Image (cartoon, helix red, strand yellow):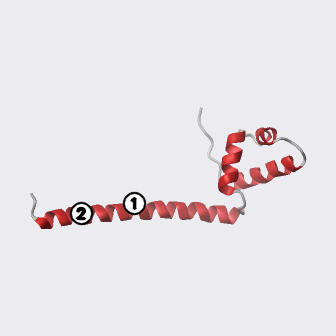
């Protein structure tokens, strides 16, 4: 069964709806099921997106993508330096 990927805006709106239900006295697992997710997903999302607004969540995801790209570039540069260092030492 294919998993559905939720956008940060959807996640935050679902978290807010669940928080409203919990404040009304509904248990967390029932409130999460009402929104179409399991309780474990609710707690994981709450840990990651807990106090964020929608624009902050979008920015966080953009920064994570950029950080991954920069890490990959750094790893490639370090590999190139190691190759050049080995070639310059004359160990063939």
Say which quadrant the C terminus sits in. Answer: bottom left
How many numbered marks have been drawn onto this rendered protein structure?
Answer: 2
Callout 1 secondary element: helix
Dot placed on the residue nearer the N-terminal end, 2 or 1: 1
- The image shows residue 22, relative to residue 92, as above or below, that is above
What percent of the width, then of the height, locates residue 62? 56, 63
- Is 25 left or right of 46, judged from the image as shown? right
* Residue that numbered label 2 is attached to: 82
- Is 9 left or right of 30, judged from the image as shown? left
* Residue that numbered label 1 is attached to: 72
What percent of the width, then of the height, locates residue 53? 72, 63
Instruction: Tell me which residue sits at (37%, 64%) in the image.
Output: 73
Instruction: Tell me which residue sits at (79%, 54%) in the image.
Output: 16
Q: Callout 2 environment at 10 Å: few (<14), some (14 to 19), or many (20+)?
A: few
Per the rendering, the mark at residue 34 is none
Callout 2 secondary element: helix
The single residue placed furthest to the top in the displayed view is: 1
Say which quadrant the N terminus sits in. Answer: top right
Q: What's the CA distance linking mark 2 and mark 1? A: 15 Å
The single residue placed furthest to the right in the displayed view is: 24
Instruction: Tell me which residue sits at (31%, 65%) in the image.
Output: 77
Instruction: Tell me which residue sits at (89%, 44%) in the image.
Output: 25
Q: Callout 1 environment at 10 Å: few (<14), some (14 to 19), or many (20+)?
A: few
């Amino acid at each position: 069964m294919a998993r559905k990927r939720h956008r940060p805006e959807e996640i935050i709106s679902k978290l807010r709806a669940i928080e409203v239900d919990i404040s009304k006295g509904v248990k967390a697992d029932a409130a999460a099921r009402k929104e179409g997710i399991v309780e474990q997903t609710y707690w994981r999302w709450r840990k990651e997106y807990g106090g964020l607004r929608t624009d902050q969540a979008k920015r966080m995801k953009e920064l994570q993508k950029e950080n991954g790209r920069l890490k990959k570039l750094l790893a490639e540069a370090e590999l190139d330096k190691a190759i050049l260092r080995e070639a310059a030492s004359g160990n063939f």
